[in-house]
Image: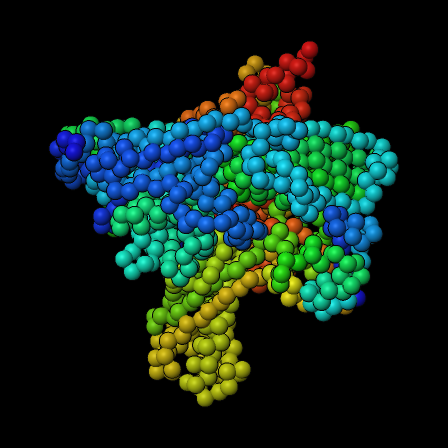
Amino acid sequence: MHNKVHVRTTINGEPREFLCEPRQSLLECLRDVLGLTGAKEGCNDGNCGACTVIMDDRIVASCLVLGVEAEGAAITTIEGISQGSRLHPIQRAFLQNAALQCGICTPGFIVAAKALLDREPHPSEERIRTYLANNLCRCTGYDKIVRAVQQAAASEEVVR
Amino acid sequence: MSDRQYAVVGTRPVRHDGADKVTGRALYGADFQAADLLHGCVLRSPHSHARILRIDTSKAMALPGVKAVVTAADFPQGPDRMVDLGDGDVPISYVRGNLLASGKVLYRGHAVAAVAAVSQHIAEEAAGLIEVEYQPLPCVLTAPEAMQEGAPLVHEDLKTKELGQPTDRAGNVAEHLRFAMGDIDAGFAAADVVVEREFRTATVHQGYIEPHAATALWNNDGRVLIWCSTQGAFIVRDVTACVLDIPVSRLKVTPMEIGGGFGGKITVYLEPVAALLSRKCGRPVKLVMTRKDVFEGTGPTPGSFIRVKIGARNDGRITAAQAYLAYEAGANPGSMVVPGAMCIFAAYDIANVAIDCYDVVVNKPSTQAYRAPGATNAAFAAETVVDEIAEKLALDPIEFRLRNAAKEGTRRADGPKYRRIGCVEVLETMKQHPHYNAPLEGPHRGRGVAVGFWFNIGFPSSCNISVNADGTVNLVEGSTDIGGSRTSIAMQAAEVLGIAAEDVNPSVGDTDSIGYTSMTGGSRTTFATGWAAWEAAQDVMRQMKERAAKLWGVDPAAITAETGLFRSGENKLTFRELAARLVETGGPIVGRGAVNPKGAGGSFAGSIVDVEVDPETGKVSILRFTSVQDAGKAIHPSYVEGQMQGGSVQGIGWALNEEYFMSSDGAMLNSSFLDYRMPTALDLPMIDTAIVEVPNPGHPFGVRGVGEANIVPPPAAIANAIYRAAGVRMRRLPMNPPAIMEAIWDQRD
Amino acid sequence: MAEVHIPAMLRELTGGRAMVEAAGSTVREVVEDLERQWPGIRERLVDGTRLRANLSVAVDGEVSPLGLAEAVEPLSEVHFVAAIKGGAPT
């Protein structure tokens, strides 16, 4: 039996605490300990972006962060993007632009796109592609994803 | 363009499963939870070819937290026999052998044993404690190597099937087939220009972002319950039942949402192994592949060696075409070289054709389908040679293709004549497209085109529709949804019923709750399951009319229905109004459709691409890309565009960077997303699309499957563009920077 | 009589002919008639009661899911083609 560490953190604005082994990644803690399965494991070595979460105002690959590192941090996952029962403009734009096919990469993209628009409300196409370069999508070819982010940026209701 | 006007078909509603997918609520295979769930880990061979001398699982079993360990010895034992799992007869030992190796391991990554434990970490630790003694054997890694006399044998008992007939010849060639028409020698003799070239392509992977995941519970009542990500719940059921020797009725497969497949998640890898583990310990067991497992232990698409020879007259008419294709099947026969051979000249009307194709086993993972399997390799070869000939004849590349384009009535090399197809329309659309006519200025820039074909398939599908009292309907169908198909299926039902797409609640059934449905693949889903939905909706309409007839005291034949309004004389009721009165007129209405349709129309696709080649580094930038494809009828244009864009980008990755980089002893050295380099958002421009609609006479709405043909032309189009940009003809895939630089330097010497 | 197109690999059984005529109102009957004319050909096409697993039959350009049971008209074109599936389960 491995000794577990007691972690206190904030997830999607709510104080949360959990026990985890030191060797468990934040991604594992979110999915297996806290039941937040929106972040996905695509590669477990930081190269696909499917596990993207926001940690203290920057995006991270949660597979490369240890669960114990969440102590005292503020984390936003895909589960915290919509505003109550209202979809965030980015989520709406993804749906309207058919910017997803299988949807496995979508949570990571939406979190990353939100982080981008929070700091750069009107990014150029090249800026969008650069910022999202670590989020792999195999289904869409990225065209409609970029258009969705452009549409969300143009929408006046983007919430900071 | 098909000019029939529809109310729902052709519109762009938001997909029904959209909210769940953008909020992270949708549950994929690895998200499945259950009480007492155990986590599994698969131990895989480090050798590409070796005899298994001994497996000792005792230390693994002794680790606290480990509940079960299985090997091939846990399969039902008995004499080998042939089984037909939908792809022709294959020895059951090959099927079981790829799930858990017995006797020999045939590729690095071949599964050898599996563990179930209380945590993923303990399962991994335990797998590391399983002792396997191997006797390494020499390996073969490419088709030409494996075809040589005296090459190490992957399967000692494999005998070559020669032109459809079994022989006694042992070797690594599983099959040699030939397609021929006309008189090939006379054809070449009549040509003014003949070009013959050889091509090689590397192994590539479908690259789905979600690794395979499955949970199995061998329940106390003897039923085996499975939850998994799959392109075919019924395939999982049938294969698992077969290898475990249990009746299909004992299995229930619930498909979870699936994170990409592209053909690679039709094959069954985990479910029977999870079931064996669960049987041993009585608890549900979840097996999820790591990314390394996916690269090394699933089914990439074949590397290949292809020789193409084409002859043409000065007036632009092709007089003869010959091809030799040898594809690496990986460890087990079945490389999709045959569809490749059938597609290689499919865009052209050629009287004299001779194609020889070879399915060759090698010590690599057993290859599986990847989006138009076999056709992309073939088109890379053929469309490059076509480009060369057009250049020699000083003809525009599209014009040259138009002079030889396949049409209705053209005979293909494998025999049948085409029915109505859109090759000419696709070429004309390319020719007139603004992209093709835009000036391309600047040094080291060039434009290339290519076309490709895929047959598309029919196969069985089932669908039930039940009418709700509020005028909406529930639709259950059997096609797991990899890309939004439940919506295009719902739209086809909505069109027949005369209601809005939003008033259909589509869902994907499990194997207990919906009729048999074949896999989501082969570009069949919108076509065949859409047809099943169409039939189910027709059944509902027939019953609705009977109810209205009861209410109005008229003959059902006197009732018309249009866009949701039932009428007879002065009587009228909307679908919604009539739906509210079903109980009083006889009870619930359930419509059903079950089809196994003919008439899947083939789809032609074209790529136009502008590239810039950096002469110092060999890097190829895609400046502009247009995908053109015949969809027959685009049910939901956004998702048709999405298929075209997605397939094109996979083709771009295949062309420029993706490959299994193999060591000389058969290890994949780049089994991660860092080094198996798939395109990112930063590598690409927008992908423009032009949907051509030459309706398929074989479908109620004219649908042709669009999922696949779009991946076929991009590598050839990019090769043709590189030629115009850098003056070098590339004949190997991938055309990565070192390869381009070598070609440029060779040319300078 | 239906026009039966003989795949390259079977032409040795039909004296090199790429196209032969055969009578029958179903593919099964056509195969029987082919066997009468060219003994040995049935075994290459049929396995027990169904078409060999690696073959499909296309009548008038349409691959038929009914296989041997598919109807054949007097002037139909019949082809035996390699079976195309979307992917393999193994």
Query: Residue B522: x and y, percent?
Result: 55, 50
- Residue B339 relative to residue B641: left or right: right
- The quadrant where residue A91 appears: top left
As drawn, the residue found furthest toward the top would be B749
Q: Is residue B679 visible?
A: no
Q: Residue at x 63, y 37 (%)?
A: B170
Question: Which quadrant does the N terminus of chain B fall into?
Answer: bottom right
> Up-down: is B746 above or below B261?
above
Q: Residue at x 27, y 32 (%)?
A: B59
Query: Residue B519: x and y, percent?
Result: 49, 53
Question: Which quadrant does the C terminus of chain B fall into?
Answer: top right
Q: Nearer the viewer, residue B344 or B466?
A: B344
Query: Residue B351: x and y, percent?
Result: 80, 45
> Up-down: is B4 above or below A79?
below
As drawn, the residue found furthest toward the bottom would be B553
Q: Nearer the viewer, residue B440 or B56?
A: B56
- Residue B423 relative to residue B617: left or right: right
Q: How is the image coloured?
A: rainbow
Query: Residue A54: x and y, percent?
Result: 26, 33
Q: Is residue B257 visible?
A: yes
Q: Residue at x 69, y 47 (%)?
A: B165
Q: How many marks?
A: 0
Q: Nearer the viewer, residue B123 or B276?
A: B276
> Up-down: is B12 above or below B47?
below
Q: Residue at x 73, y 45 (%)?
A: B179
